[in-house]
Image (cartoon, grey):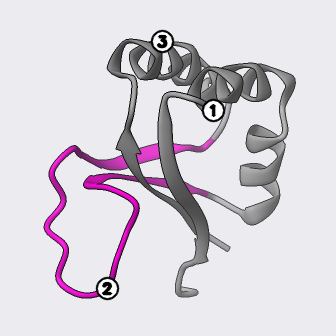
Amino acid sequence: MTVYAIAHSRIEDRKQFDAYVAAAGPTFAGTSAKILAVDEASEFIEGELPGPRTVIVRFDSADEFHRWYDSPDYKAARKLREHAAVGAFVLVTGFAG
């Protein structure tokens, strides 16, 4: 079943974060991942989020998402993000059909 990985973040170190983005992009190769949205100035309607950057990525399944997220290549890219941004990352299951 389709899942959506949704990240909200506040960038603390733009140079380091840009290095993360450059390293993370190629890790999607060979997956069903489709980047649906990247917004650096999301409009908050209710509640609190860590920052205005929102990214939404669709995967064909939760298993595929976890294979990507736990892959050695993405783990290496994540290290670049650790001190570059503060955020939250959730996985949401889509509707069947």
Determine the image quadrant of residue 38: top left
Instruction: Specify the segment rendered in magenta.
Output: 32-59
On screen, residue 50 versus residue 96, left or right, reads left
Q: Nearer the viewer, residue 59 or 86?
A: 86
Position of residue 56 in the picture relative to residue 27 (left or right): left
Q: Nearer the viewer, residue 61 or 70?
A: 70
- Whether residue 29 sits left or right of residue 25 in the image: it is right
For marks 2 and 3, the one nearer the N-term is 3
Tell me whether circle 1 and circle 2 mark residues in contact (CB < 8 Å): no
Q: Which residue is mark 1?
A: 82
Please tell me whether mark 2 sits on a helix, a strand or a loop.
Answer: loop
Residue at 33 percent of width and 21 percent of height: 14
- Residue drawn 40% across and 61% down? 50
Query: Where residue 75 sits: x, y (%)?
Result: 78, 28
Callout 3: SS: helix
- Judge depth for marks 2 and 3 and give the one in front: 2
**Relative height, residue 66 to residue 45 (above, below):** above
Structural distance between the alpha carbons of marks 2 and 3? 30 Å
At label 1, counting other C-alpha atoms closer than 10 Å, the crowd grade (few under 14, some 14-19, many 20 or more) is: few
Please give the residue where the numbered disc 3 appears in the rendered image: 19
Q: Examine the rendered structure and indicate whether residue 68 appears above or below residue 80.
A: below
Q: Which mark is residue 47?
A: 2
Q: Earlier in the sequence, mark 3 or mark 1?
A: 3
